[in-house]
């Protein structure tokens, strides 16, 4: 069977970064003493944060690194599927609208960082993997994709 490329929704399949993002926004609002009304889409929110906070990414990275163990736990079943898919020749990537700093910490804490070859927005991931990549938006879809490899 030819190698298949899978684009995994980071938040739905591997690690939901939204709760940690929201905790950071609350903390940043309090620390900076500014009202941070940001769009739900985190790519768009980044532009607002650039304007309101300036160099906010290192603050997010420190906050996320300190609190990641509370928010993220490895999932043995998911990691086993990722390992078997990779061993079967599948190319794995993760997409999210979360800032890269947060996404990388999440991947590391759930034990998936070494399995993911590309991380970015859906458009970036699909450009890297190619047009025939399968978009996986849930753990059940990941299990079905693994079944294609008879895993």
Image (cartoon, helix red, strand yellow):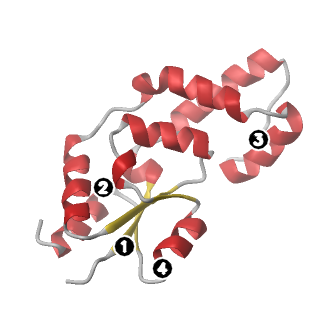
Q: Are marks 3 and 1 in contact (CB under 8 Å)?
A: no
Secondary structure, mark 1, is strand
- The residue that disc 4 covers is 130
Does residue 41 show up? no
Does residue 136 show up? yes
Up the image or down, 59 lies above or below 113; here it is above
Between circles 3 and 1, the one closer to the viewer is 1
- Binning the other alpha carbons within 10 Å of mark 1 as few (below 14), some (14 to 19) or many (20 upward) gives many
Q: Seen in the image, is 71 located left or right of residue 48? A: left
- The residue that disc 2 covers is 139
- Binning the other alpha carbons within 10 Å of mark 4 as few (below 14), some (14 to 19) or many (20 upward) gives few
User: In which quadrant is the C terminus drawn?
Assistant: bottom left
Residue 5, disc:
1
Between circles 4 and 3, the one closer to the viewer is 4
User: In which quadrant is the N terminus drawn?
Assistant: bottom left
Q: Are marks 4 and 1 in contact (CB under 8 Å)?
A: yes
Q: Along the polypeptide, which appears first: circle 1 or circle 2?
A: 1
- The residue that disc 3 covers is 38
Secondary structure, mark 4, is loop
Q: Which residue is drawn at 21% across and 66% down?
A: 146
Q: Position of residue 138 (x, y in %)?
A: 36, 58
Q: Residue at x 19, y 68 (%)?
A: 88
- Binning the other alpha carbons within 10 Å of mark 2 as few (below 14), some (14 to 19) or many (20 upward) gives some
Q: Do the residues labelled 3 and 2 touch (CB within 8 Å)?
A: no
Query: Distance between the Cα atoms at labels 3 and 2?
Result: 29 Å
Q: Where is residue 116 in the image (x, y as percent from the top left)?
A: 40, 55
Q: Seen in the image, is 99 located left or right of residue 54? A: left
């Amino acid at each position: 069977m030819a190698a298949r490329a899978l684009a995994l929704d980071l938040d739905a399949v591997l690690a939901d970064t939204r709760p940690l993002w929201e905790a950071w926004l609350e903390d940043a609002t309090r620390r900076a003493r500014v009202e941070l009304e940001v769009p739900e889409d985190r790519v768009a929110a980044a532009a607002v944060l650039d304007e309101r906070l300036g160099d906010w990414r290192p603050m997010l990275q420190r906050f996320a690194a300190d609190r990641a163990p509370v928010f993220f736990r490895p999932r043995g079943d998911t990691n086993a599927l990722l390992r078997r898919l990779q061993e079967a020749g599948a190319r794995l990537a993760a997409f999210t609208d979360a800032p890269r700093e947060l996404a990388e910490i999440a991947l590391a804490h759930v034990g998936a960082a070494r399995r993911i070859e590309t991380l970015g927005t859906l458009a970036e991931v699909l450009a890297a993997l190619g047009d025939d990549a399968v978009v996986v938006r849930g753990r059940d879809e990941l299990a079905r994709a693994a079944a294609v490899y008879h895993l």
